[in-house]
Amino acid sequence: MKYPLDEFKNEIILNLKKTLFKYKCEIRLEIPAENMGDFAFPCFSLAPQAKKSPNEISKDAADKIEKSKWIAKAEAKGGYINFFVDDKHLISSTLTSIFKLNEKYGQLQKKDKKAIIEHTSANPNGPLHVGRARNPIIGDTIVRIFKAAGYNVESQFYLDDMGKQVAILVWGINNEDKISKDINNYYPPGSAYVSSKKNNADHQRVVFYQVSSNLMQRDDKVANEIGEIVKRSECGEHEVINLIHKAYSPVLEGIKESLNRINITVDKYVPESNFVKDKSVNSVVEKLKKSKYCSKEEGAFYLDMEPFGIQGRNTKFVFVRKDGTTLYATRDIAYHLWKAKHADLLVNILGEDHKLESKQVEIALNLMGAKIIPKVIFYSFVSLPDGKMSTRRGRVIYLDDLIDECVKRAYDEVEKRRGKELSKKKMREIAETVGIGALRYNIIKVQPEKDIVFKWEEALNFEGNAVPFIQYAHARACGILSKTINKKREFDSNTLKHDSEVKLVKQLAKFPLFIEEASSGYKPHIIASYLYETASKFNQFYRDCPVLSEKNTMLRRSRIAVVDATRIVLKNALQLLGISAPEEM
């Protein structure tokens, strides 16, 4: 699938190859600063071959570039050749492309490649908490971007059904009579928090985990009983594994409900125990034991990580304990080898606290000759500027609490602005759309590796870089279109000459480029940047160019077409972020 800017780029490349035929160089185009052209080619790498300055090379080459239906002119500046597109041709081609493809506009050519994207993978011992809220949101956005980029995509949740956390939960549920008094002290029956979450199994059962975890720290007998559950599950005892599944299943359903509230579904849940049951983890152990980097200490087997640049206390990567059981990371290696049999590309979304273990797994996979090594996107955690939302005793703030607060604050904003003209039902609908959109957008707009302090005044800002500003631009476009009768989408690109018109359509033309960059560079945040820039340019267009009141019939129709095209692109880009595009706000 070729888009207008693809054709423009191809024509530039052909021209450059013809003009620079005597030089050995890879032709890579850059996007220059505004008003400096639409694409640019840097000549600096050619200077040693040409024995000329980049300025001289760019000037000589620019003079030889011929105008065409795409290339309006080429200009040398500062060692670059800047190419300017023919605005009329680009506007005509872009609007035609958007109306032809509609909801598929921006999507790239189908690739014969499958990507497995693993995200969330939270321990099923309680609700998702705010700190890790970035994981499912980044993961789901990457899934959507890769689908738009033409990949066959499957999302996976790696289910830790063998670790200590679920063992603590199992012990608590199966010893309810012993800990009922502690539970009542922890969250008294009828307390506001428990009542508000009474239908959420993940919120109910986390109490068993919290109480049992505290008890384990004080009582060696409880610790030993929990340790026995861990050991028996890791030995593959079906009875214990089934007991664990029965304990966490309601919690997992609660996690799924939370994800569903923010428009996230997972294609496949893969239990860790699968790789014990099918003996594939045994195969991993045997292969790692044969590595020249493997050593044995007090019955435990480990890989020496020092030759791979890992220093300090973490030079020993233990993959078999002295009692013969394997570790989470060992089974994770088996999981990645299994995934590699079913995909061409593996992507993992992990918190920054998993960097060491992820590196150890990567080294082990390389030692085993794995054909596919996962690309890992690490993220920093989310924090809140104050503790107002903290649950009882300040233990943790759950994702459900954050969602509720987002929707509540969004409702207050909508009521303040339109309370006199909208019904409560309509305001609630808008608040749900805006609130959940604000949560997703405010998290995804920041590069994953950077910290986030979630601030309400930023998330629900109708004027700045926040989702209400973008959603309002879409709603405004819908409002304009509801008052028109230009159903045939007639336009004449010759009439669209205003700077704000040209800049907006050029911005719409760039959408496929942003999808390509977001997928190839694993940069979900640039889609948020694109949306903000598009909404800003649309507002400038609306300010500078009358639409419904324009008296020139063809110009009015052409501007209506630009509004319609903007609506389509805003909606498509919002969907990449899992955010709804409201028709009214």
Image (cartoon, helix red, strand yellow):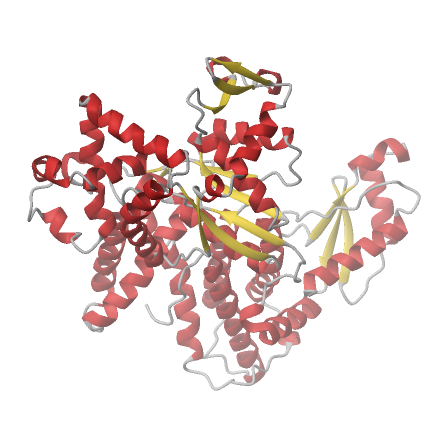
* Picture residue at 55% right of the left edge, 29% below the top: 285
Quarter of the rendering occupied by the N terminus: bottom right
Quarter of the rendering occupied by the C terminus: bottom left
* Picture residue at 80% right of the left edge, 35% below the top: 45
Give the number of callouts. 0
Vertically, is 309 above or below 19? Answer: above
Q: With 578 as the anchor, is 431 left or right in this view?
A: left
Residue 292 location, x and y as percent?
Answer: 64, 19
| Residue 510 or residue 367, whichever sits in front | 367
Residue 393 location, x and y as percent?
Answer: 14, 35
| Residue 409 or residue 145, whichever sits in front | 145
| Residue 405 or residue 317, whichever sits in front | 317
Residue 115 location, x and y as percent?
Answer: 58, 51
Can residue 395 be spotted in the picture? Answer: no
Residue lying furthest right? 22
Residue 153 location, x and y as percent?
Answer: 55, 56
| Residue 74 or residue 528, whichever sits in front | 528
In the figure, residue 504 lies in which quadrant?
bottom right
In the figure, residue 229 lies in which quadrant?
top left
Vertically, is 181 above or below 517? Answer: above
Can residue 578 be spotted in the picture? Answer: yes
* Picture residue at 84% right of the left edge, 41% below the top: 25
Q: With 424 as the anchor, is 118 left or right in this view?
A: right
Q: With 397 as the anchor, is 107 left or right in this view?
A: right
